[in-house]
Image (cartoon, rainbow, N blue to C red):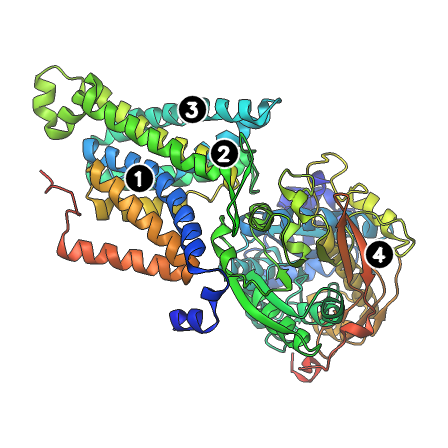
């Protein structure tokens, strides 16, 4: 998988060209394109020049395990797209830059893509604080920024017309669609534990509202810094009368988090409903995690192959990304994927393809046309391009809506016990990006 | 504000006050014990060598990362892998520190300003080296034994309790080494007056290398002990470094008694304040304490004026 990385250097760039013979002069200009942006721009617009997609990856920092799998998924989808003839007859090239899961670096990386790498678009960011830090720069540089982040920041109207989230659902729709199930099956008095940054605050705000709509109540909110490594000290704040413990945690300490949660409660515990984020890239077979048996998790896409016919395209997707039926890497069963989230990269790349084809995208001059084309989309049918399931897209809010899964830990594996409908997750638009000028 | 929120939202009725305080104290004691060992290393290096080792936290991180590596090399019971890590990880870290002392600090003639800059460089080299060789993921290290101590109100890791005890034994050992052995005497003599010690035939250069290595080893031991309750991660050195500095400044640079006492105060108060109120408040309070100490008693509680 990794050998497909195209952290493009100029030498690689030349060898990949198949039209070099007609472009002798243009190639010379392209080589000098760092110095002469305009001449480079024209060279890029030539017909079979690759479409360059800047991939803003969390290779290091607290998002590293997501970053690794986002990269593998992206590369697998890019390979498939290229094998099938690319986009508008042009191959795609993924140019990866590490943002260190750092908002400041994120904005710099966007700039690097736009000005130095001259990518057509930027894609692939997960962590909400990085998205929020990078999006304004993408808007200023007028480069389309396709995020795979889950945060509500896109649909809330906080960002700008250049930012779209067409491949993964947002926290508001996720919690809204699941709150009725939680309220009627697990309990109404909820204590929430969440990371203390934008993504966690989305959970806090929208789940509180959603469970209140079910006649429930959040009785305690425990915010934990996302870089925390020891969690035990937070648990005594969980009130005794808690019926449901709702947890969502990210960062390097998630395994410690779920372990200590089990240690704290032992067998005498409330119902526990977590977001799989607390367990992404973590092996359920780790000693100490037996305590999670019987607890529930949200999953965007079920980590363990369910074989119940609900996701007919799961097997194909799994094989292409290199994931086994337990959600682990085919080459290392201890390397657990971030399966619930990473499909978003795959689906987003296919939407970029669809958008570029609809807009007859030729080069950076057509960026606005690309955004308008994606805004015009309304639904994405389930298929190899959308293996997680069918989706509805709202062009006004730049946000997609889909099915959510609730799984229970059963015999050390996650088994889906409830699937929401797309309709459960819809909410009134809060913004109309299409009315904003480019 | 936070405090009032805490009381209003009823943190205190979630568990009765007694058990709540017990848990807070246990958590604080674990932190205090590990912090005391780590900070002792920093304090010793400063006391004897007058070197402010900014890379101290990275030696801590290296200890944890090596513990993962060593215990994953050895199959068999976790106890075996852990004991091997407890012996070999500090030795490797100590060896590395000795090399750093010979290659870098010695050549700077232990100039206080230059060594600060040099150890900042060392911090980045070690951290990025770990990122390159070990990777950006946090990895678990199995605890040598695993049992849950069930208090009537909550469960607690038996291993964590053993960490407190082990650290106490280690601290006593270090104290005995410094006050009851010939090596300790040589170290104290060098700390007291480097030139006179040299005149009496003490190999000061070797003492320096040894002390720097020993300081790093203390951090590594602390890390090996605590890593089964956390995970090994390449950025984990920052917190221990900051807390060690806080402890050493409060206790007085170079004073062992002060370091241990300050570690207990900071560790316990951090655990208790985090539980009853908020982790940020704990950090704010300990930083204010440092500022107050620096204003009113710049040498720390037990420090003596620098000579």
| Residue B194: x %, y % from top left | 12, 26
Rounded to the nearest angstrom, the CA distance separating label 2 from label 4 is 38 Å
| Residue B118: x %, y % from top left | 30, 38
Q: Give the side of residue B81 with respect to residue B199, left or right.
A: right
Pointer 3 with pointer 4, Cβ within 8 A: no
Image quarter of the C terminus of chain B = top left
Report which residue position mark 1 lands on: B39
Seen at 38% across and 39% down, the residue is B34
> Of marks 3 and 1, which one's residue comes earlier in the chain?
1
Crowdedness near tag 4: few (<14), some (14–19) or many (≥20) residues, C-alpha within 10 Å = many
Q: Give the side of residue A433 with respect to residue B190, left or right.
A: right
Rounded to the nearest angstrom, the CA distance separating label 2 from label 1 is 19 Å
Image quarter of the N terminus of chain B = bottom left
Rounded to the nearest angstrom, the CA distance separating label 3 from label 4 is 48 Å
> Of marks 2 and 3, which one's residue comes earlier in the chain?
2
Report which residue position mark 3 lands on: B92
**Residue B65 circle label:** 2
List the single residue furthest toward the top. Answer: B201
Rounded to the nearest angstrom, the CA distance separating label 2 from label 3 is 11 Å
Q: Is residue B208 visible?
A: no
Q: Give the number of the mark in front: 3 or 1.
A: 1
Crowdedness near tag 3: few (<14), some (14–19) or many (≥20) residues, C-alpha within 10 Å = some
Q: Give the number of the mark in front: 2 or 4.
A: 2
Report which residue position mark 4 lands on: A387
């Amino acid at each position: 998988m990794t050998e497909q990385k195209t952290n493009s250097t100029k030498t690689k760039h030349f060898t990949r060209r198949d039209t070099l013979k007609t472009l002798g002069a243009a190639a010379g200009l392209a080589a000098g394109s760092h110095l002469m942006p305009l001449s480079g721009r024209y060279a890029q617009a030539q017909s079979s020049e690759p479409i360059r997609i800047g991939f803003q990856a969390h290779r290091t920092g607290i998002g590293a395990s997501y970053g690794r799998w986002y990269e593998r998924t992206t590369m697998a989808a890019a390979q498939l797209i290229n094998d099938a003839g690319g986009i508008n007859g042009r191959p795609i090239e993924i140019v990866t830059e590490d943002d260190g899961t750092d908002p400041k670096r994120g904005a710099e990386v966007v700039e690097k893509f736009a000005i130095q790498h001259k990518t057509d678009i930027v894609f692939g960011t997960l962590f909400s604080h990085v998205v929020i830090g990078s999006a304004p720069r993408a808007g200023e540089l007028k480069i389309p920024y396709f995020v795979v982040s889950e945060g509500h920041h896109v649909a809330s109207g906080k960002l700008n017309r250049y930012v779209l989230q067409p491949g993964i659902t947002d926290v508001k729709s996720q919690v809204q669609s699941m709150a009725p199930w939680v309220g009627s099956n697990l309990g109404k008095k909820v204590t929430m534990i969440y990371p203390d940054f934008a993504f966690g605050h989305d959970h806090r705000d929208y789940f509180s509202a959603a469970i209140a709509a079910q006649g429930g109540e959040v009785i305690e909110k425990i915010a934990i810094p996302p870089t925390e490594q020891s969690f035990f000290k937070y648990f005594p704040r969980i009130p005794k009368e808690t019926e449901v413990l709702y947890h969502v945690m990210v960062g390097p300490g998630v395994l410690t988090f779920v372990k200590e949660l089990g240690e704290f409660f032992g067998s005498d515990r409330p119902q526990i409903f977590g977001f799989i984020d607390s367990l992404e890239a973590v092996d359920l077979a780790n000693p100490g995690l037996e305590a999670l048996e019987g607890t529930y998790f949200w999953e965007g896409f079920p980590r363990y192959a369910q074989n119940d016919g609900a996701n007919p395209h799961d097997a194909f997707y799994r094989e292409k990304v290199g994931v086994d039926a337990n959600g682990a890497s085919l080459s290392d069963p201890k390397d657990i994927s971030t399966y619930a989230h990473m499909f978003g990269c795959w689906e987003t790349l296919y939407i970029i393809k669809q958008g570029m084809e609809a807009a007859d995208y030729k080069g950076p001059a057509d960026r606005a046309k690309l955004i308008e084309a994606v805004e015009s989309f309304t639904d994405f049918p389930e298929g190899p391009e959308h293996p997680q399931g069918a989706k509805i897209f709202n062009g006004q809010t730049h946000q997609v809506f889909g099915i959510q899964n609730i799984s229970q830990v059963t015999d050390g594996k996650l088994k889906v016990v409830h699937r929401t409908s797309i309709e459960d997750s819809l909410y009134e638009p809060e913004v109309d990006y299409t009315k904003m000028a480019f | 504000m936070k405090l009032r929120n805490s009381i209003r939202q009823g943190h205190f009725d979630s568990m009765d006050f007694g058990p709540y305080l017990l848990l807070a104290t246990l958590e604080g004691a674990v932190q205090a014990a590990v912090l005391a060992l780590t900070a002792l290393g920093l304090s010793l290096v400063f006391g004897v060598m007058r070197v402010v080792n900014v890379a101290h936290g990275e030696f801590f991180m290296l200890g944890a990362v090596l513990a993962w590596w060593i215990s994953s090399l050895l199959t068999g019971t976790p106890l075996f892998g852990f004991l091997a890590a407890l012996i070999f990880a500090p030795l490797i870290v100590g060896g590395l520190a000795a090399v750093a002392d010979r290659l870098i600090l010695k050549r700077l003639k232990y100039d206080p300003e230059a060594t600060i800059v040099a150890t900042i460089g060392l911090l980045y080299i070690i951290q990025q080296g770990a990122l390159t060789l070990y990777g950006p993921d946090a990895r678990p290290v199995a605890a040598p034994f695993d049992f849950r101590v069930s208090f009537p109100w909550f469960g607690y890791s038996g291993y964590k309790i053993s960490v407190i005890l082990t650290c106490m034994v280690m601290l006593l050992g270090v104290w005995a080494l410094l006050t009851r052995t010939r090596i300790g005497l040589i170290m104290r003599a060098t700390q007291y007056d480097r030139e006179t010690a040299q005149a009496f035939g003490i190999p000061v250069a070797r003492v320096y290398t040894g002390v720097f290595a020993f300081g790093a080893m203390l951090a590594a031991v602390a890390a090996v002990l605590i890593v089964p309750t956390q995970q090994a991660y390449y950025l984990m050195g920052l917190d221990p470094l900051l807390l060690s500095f806080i402890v050493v400044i409060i206790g007085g640079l170079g004073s062992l008694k002060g370091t241990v006492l300050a570690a207990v105060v900071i560790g316990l108060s951090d655990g208790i304040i985090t539980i009853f109120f908020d982790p940020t408040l704990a950090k704010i309070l300990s930083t204010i304490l440092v500022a107050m100490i620096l204003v009113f008693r710049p040498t720390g509680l037990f420090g003596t004026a620098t000579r």
